[in-house]
Amino acid sequence: MADVTLLSANLLVAYTAYFVGTASPGPSNLAIMSIAANHGRKPALTFALGVITGSMFWATVAMLGVSAALIAYSQFLVALKIFGGVYLLWLAFKSGRAALNPSSHKAAVSTEGEPLKRIYLRGALLHLTNPKAVLSWVSIVALSSSHDGAVQPAILPGCISISVTVFCGYALLFSTQAARRTYLRLRRWLDGGLALVFGVVGWRLLLSARA
């Protein structure tokens, strides 16, 4: 009975940690919000599914124990930080350019005219190049493990449910007419905020790659 209680407690802690990390503002959430407000529900949900796929990829890798080996291989993590940092700085540049142009109606994170397949791949790429996702999943798997190191089978389906709820929830919320009207009124300020977040995170990734 004590073992069951301990396993349940570990699982609850892991779910809580994943929810906090997923729901807190970050590049993926901000990109989903921007796409939803500018281009509507369908592109935003497609991008969100890409982000979820990227997250579940790292989850599977962590559960198989591969991620710990990859982290131990420092060159992999350095390459991931450089690639992710450069990509985020590019998004920061686009966001800053949109914020500085008062007559521009083009979104900072634009999917206009793109096929859904490409939008999906962009969402997956944003999460696959995030070193924080790798490190977070190593911690979540450790939190959910039993005393003998075995990972609980419920961790993956539970976190998938949380991921779908959070990311798709942002897509649905920010694609409402009220949210879109608010976004258009505050577009330059919000794009400036995107530029700041993308820039700071991207620059920190590049600096950490040199450490």
Image: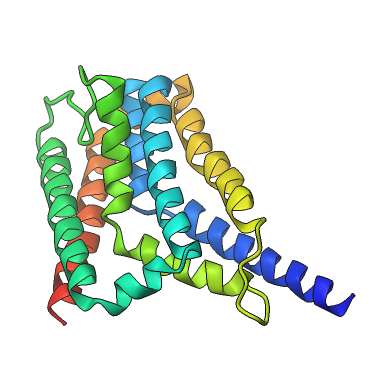
Vertical position of residue 158 compared to residue 136: above or below: above
Where is residue 74? Give x, y as percent: 22, 77
Where is residue 183? Give x, y as percent: 35, 31
Total numbered badges shown on the rendered structure: 0
Vertical position of residue 113 compared to residue 199: above or below: above
Residue 181's quadrant in the figure? top left
Where is residue 211? Give x, y as percent: 16, 82
| Residue at the far right in the pictured view | 1
Residue 11's quadrant in the figure? bottom right
The reply, left or right, for residue 1 in relation to residue 202 is: right
Vertical position of residue 12 compared to residue 210: above or below: above
Vertical position of residue 172 compared to residue 204: above or below: above
Q: Residue at x 76, y 67 (%)?
A: 8
Q: Residue at x 21, y 46 (%)?
A: 192
Q: In this rendered view, identify the residue nearer to me: 207 or 156.
A: 156
Q: Residue at x 12, y 56 (%)?
A: 86
State the colouring used for the structure image. Answer: rainbow
Q: In this rendered view, identify the residue nearer to me: 92 or 184.
A: 92
Instruction: Answer yes or no: is residue 186 visible.
Output: no
Instruction: Answer yes or no: is residue 116 visible.
Output: yes
Where is residue 55? Give x, y as percent: 42, 51
Q: In this rendered view, identify the residue nearer to me: 201 or 9.
A: 9
Q: Residue at x 48, y 54 (%)?
A: 22
The reply, left or right, for residue 89 in relation to residue 119 is: left
The N terminus: image quadrant: bottom right
